[in-house]
Amino acid sequence: MRVPQIGYLGSFGVHRKIKKTVDEPKEPLPIKNDCITFSAKSKYIKKYATLPEEIKEILTPKDAVDMFQNMDFIVQGRIKGDLIGYGDSTRVYENPWLDGYDLLIINNPSNQDQIIYSKNTLGNSVWQDRDNSNVQIIKNKAVS
């Protein structure tokens, strides 16, 4: 038997390179649960639970989420609501989701007496936001 020379030892035989890779799925996996939408709107569902029963009878949870989101946008100044009353540091906006109820935004809550000029006869506050005490829902006295 003949032994190959030392210079040739590495050049004979089969050289295979093994590449270890993870098979990637060809299509993205479907999302089974849409948690993003729930978490973004969960704070509005919590607010719906704090509403008085007289409003819960009128308002569905889906409409409440839209109403609270609209209220947040008005407070932040992202959209303009239908202004129906104003005062020195107070604004009253129409609430299209609830007939007979309006949105009251107080800029200076430390002021005990508020004078509000409005085309509607305004009543007392029936709901106050726990996160922002300047936001309230008030009832019109004309509607009972």
Image (cartoon, rainbow, N blue to C red):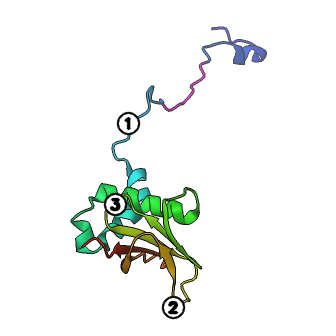
Q: Which residues are magenta?
A: 16-23
Judged from the image, the secondary structure of the residue bearing numbered disc 3 is helix
Q: In the figure, residue 1 lies in which quadrant?
A: top right
Where does label 2 land, which residue? 112
Q: CA distance from mark 2 to mark 3?
A: 29 Å
Q: In the figure, residue 62 lies in which quadrant?
A: bottom left
Q: Is the residue marked by circle 2 packed among few (<14), some (14-19), or many (20+) residues within 10 Å?
A: few
Which of the numbered marks, if any, corresponds to residue 30? 1
Which of the numbered marks, if any, corresponds to residue 64? 3
- For image coordinates 36% across by 79% down, the residue present is 123
Give residue 10's position: percent from left, percent from top. 71, 18
Left or right: 100, with 18 as reference point: left
Tag 3: residue type? Answer: Ala
Relative to 84, say whether 107 is above or below.
below
Give residue 49's position: percent from left, percent from top. 30, 70
Camera-nearest label, 1 or 3: 3
Camera-nearest label, 2 or 3: 2
